[in-house]
Image (cartoon, rainbow, N blue to C red):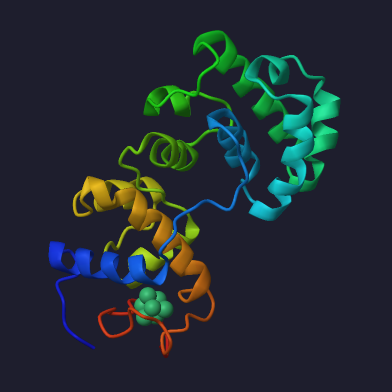
Amino acid sequence: MENHDTRSNNYLRLIHDRVMSEYPSTVTFLNYRNAFELLIAVILSARTTDQSVNEVTPTLFGKFPTPESLASAELSMLEQIVHKTGFYRSKARNIRATARQIAESHGGLVPSDMDALTALPGVGRKTAHVIRGTLFGLPSIIVDTHFGRVSRRLGLTAETNPLKVERDLEQIIPPELSHSMSMRLNKHGRVYCTSRKPRCEACPLSDVCPKVGVEDP
Ligand code: SF4
């Protein structure tokens, strides 16, 4: 393995170049037609697969296509529609309350401001960053379980708390690369750098990765 300063700009750009060529597209696997639909789909995607969200959103957005219509939906009907995504009671409540806030406080438009986004029910920093990066092209470090794990193994950070990981990586990831890096390291964590058994022998980063914490890589 080559030795690199894993907090250096050179190392970051090397990792970014490699994951760019491995995963040319960063397109989200959630289906959506506009900003509001993406926001609701990301809220529904908590602790479930993108596929199960894609299975419920055609019905959901077919019946309630706008923030105004979703804001006045019957809760029991929403629970029924989103049931398959799990945690359906809280998700139904959150998407209705978020739709209401968007209709009443944001003129029907999804805000780009971090504080405004995280004030919406069901929207944490991770969801807010997905929206900011995907819809508005803003710098966004999206710390989920995959991104955090891969970043630590690559030696980019030693932090484990998501907010600390975000703050730490903000210091070294150039803003213009942050969304691309987030999406691609997330993908890498699903394809090669999996939780239980990372496939280091086949990984395109293997020659430069210090494999921090990986047993018997
Ligand atoms: S070499 Fe192993 S630990 Fe490093 S990124 Fe690849 S799969 Fe993960």
- Viewer-closest of 217 and 109: 109
Q: Residue at x 63, y 45 (%)?
A: 31
From the top left corner, tell me how far across and down residue 205 is, in percent: 33, 78
Q: Residue at x 55, y 17 (%)?
A: 102
Give the quadrant of residue 61.
top right
Quick one: quadrant of the N terminus?
Answer: bottom left
Q: Image height check: is 55 above or below 204?
A: above
Q: Residue at x 27, y 67 (%)?
A: 17
Q: Please indicate whether residue 172 sits to the left or right of residue 32 in the image.
A: left
How many marks overall?
Answer: 0
Quick one: quadrant of the C terminus?
Answer: bottom left
Q: In what quadrant does ligand 1 lie?
A: bottom left
Give the quadrant of residue 203.
bottom left
From the top left corner, tell me how far across and down residue 40 is, in percent: 62, 33
Q: Image height check: is 135 above or below 155?
A: above
From the top left corner, tell me how far across and down residue 29 is, in percent: 58, 53
Q: Residue at x 24, y 47 (%)?
A: 176
- Viewer-closest of 213 and 66: 66
From the top left corner, tell me how far across and down residue 12 is, in percent: 22, 64
The reply to whether residue 48 is in sight is no
- Viewer-closest of 6 and 34: 34
- Viewer-closest of 44 and 167: 44
The reply to whether residue 56 is in sight is yes
Q: Please indicate whether residue 180 sits to the left or right of residue 52 in the image.
A: left
Q: Please indicate whether residue 137 sits to the left or right of residue 126 in the image.
A: left
Q: Please indicate whether residue 39 sits to the left or right of residue 200 in the image.
A: right
